[in-house]
Image (cartoon, grey):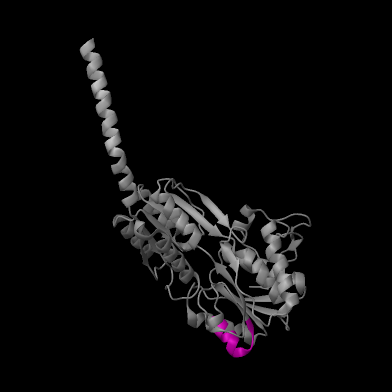
Amino acid sequence: MAWTATRRQLLTGLAAGAAWSLAPARLRAEKDRVVKAGFVYVGPVGDYGWTYRHDIGRREVEAALGPQVETSFVENVAEGADAERVIRQLAAAGHDIIFATSFGFMNAVVRVARQFPQVKFEHATGYKTADNLAVYNARFHEGRSVIGTIAGHMTRSGIVGYVASFPIPEVVMGINAFMLAMRRVRPDAVAKVVWVNSWYDPGKEADAAKALIDQGADVITQHTDSPAPLQVAEERGAYAFGQASDMSRFAPRAHLTAIIDNWGPYYVERVRAVLEGRWKSHMIWWGLKEGMVEIGPYHPDLPASVRKAAERVRRGIIDGTVHPFAGPIRDQSGRLRVPEGKTLSDEELLRMDWYVEGVQA
């Protein structure tokens, strides 16, 4: 028995000593660990819109985490089979986390996530999750309520042109939020929509803006990624708004303000979570309150009364006193969709496939 006790004490001491000796090594390993983060972009990093702002976020990750992170990106990835190929290549190349930054990448990232359960995946603007697949989205429509308010004050003709990408709920939601805000200021206003069926095509975007101005629009807004509509507005004497980033450099007279996508803080936190072993799947939808959506600087010549009106909407959305989809709301046919005193839920917004009164699309 004495021998057994001594042996047990010896083994216990050895185990404790081993644990003590391994602890610094484990700490060193965690400190020295490098997370590989990959980003898949639907457009070029130089679009000065959607992809540009995602790449700003990637660079913020590098600045925040330094040698603990390695990032890479693939730009101009077509939605569909090409996206699946690129995402799979990044996963097979040893990336720890992959950000797929376009709605149309959803099915591709879902399939690849099943094949690589050890890799973390994040999909922007989608709705499908898994244990290793998270979804993050921004409430862009909140920003469109702000610029719609400005448009209602600034339009002389009562006609606003909207250059739109694809008729998915995110885009339809934005058109409606813009229209509702504009009509609260100018009840007779209309929004003419031209679909270009592309996220980034400067030629088509410019042609759409020209066609809308020819139809009487004196304010142009967009849910596409290049500054081309703004440049047309500048040339033709119309007003316009930046998309995803401050585009004032391209249209110093026409650019009234911009909806700015701020992805950096989210990307830093999610990569840090992988680094620290605490990443978990989730589905988030953040907006002005959380800082994922911001409003850019107002044009110096924008009247003070218009700035105050825009700020009332922006601050009201943040503090919860303003809801972009508060009733009464009627659709194009005049049918009452949302009665007075009610608001649309997030679930209803994410399924939106109808237009409000005043939208010509």
Q: Quick one: 14 or 203, which is closer to the camera?
A: 14
Point out residue 28 in the picture as x, y percentages from the top left corner: 31, 47
User: Against 178, is 277 above or below?
Assistant: above
- Residue lying furthest left: 3
Image side of residue 160 versus residue 285, left or right? right
Point out residue 284 in the picture as x, y percentages from the top left corner: 54, 53
Q: Residue placed at 45% from the left, 54% from the top?
A: 270
Image side of residue 299 versus residue 69, left or right? right
Can I make out residue 268 in this image? yes
Q: Residue placed at 67% from the left, 84% from the top?
A: 218
**Magenta residues, start to end:** 229-239
Can I make out residue 182 in this image? no
Quarter of the image for residue 69 reads bottom left
Point out residue 256 in the picture as x, y percentages from the top left corner: 63, 79
Image side of residue 81 versus residue 8, left or right? right
User: Against 149, is 274 above or below?
Assistant: above
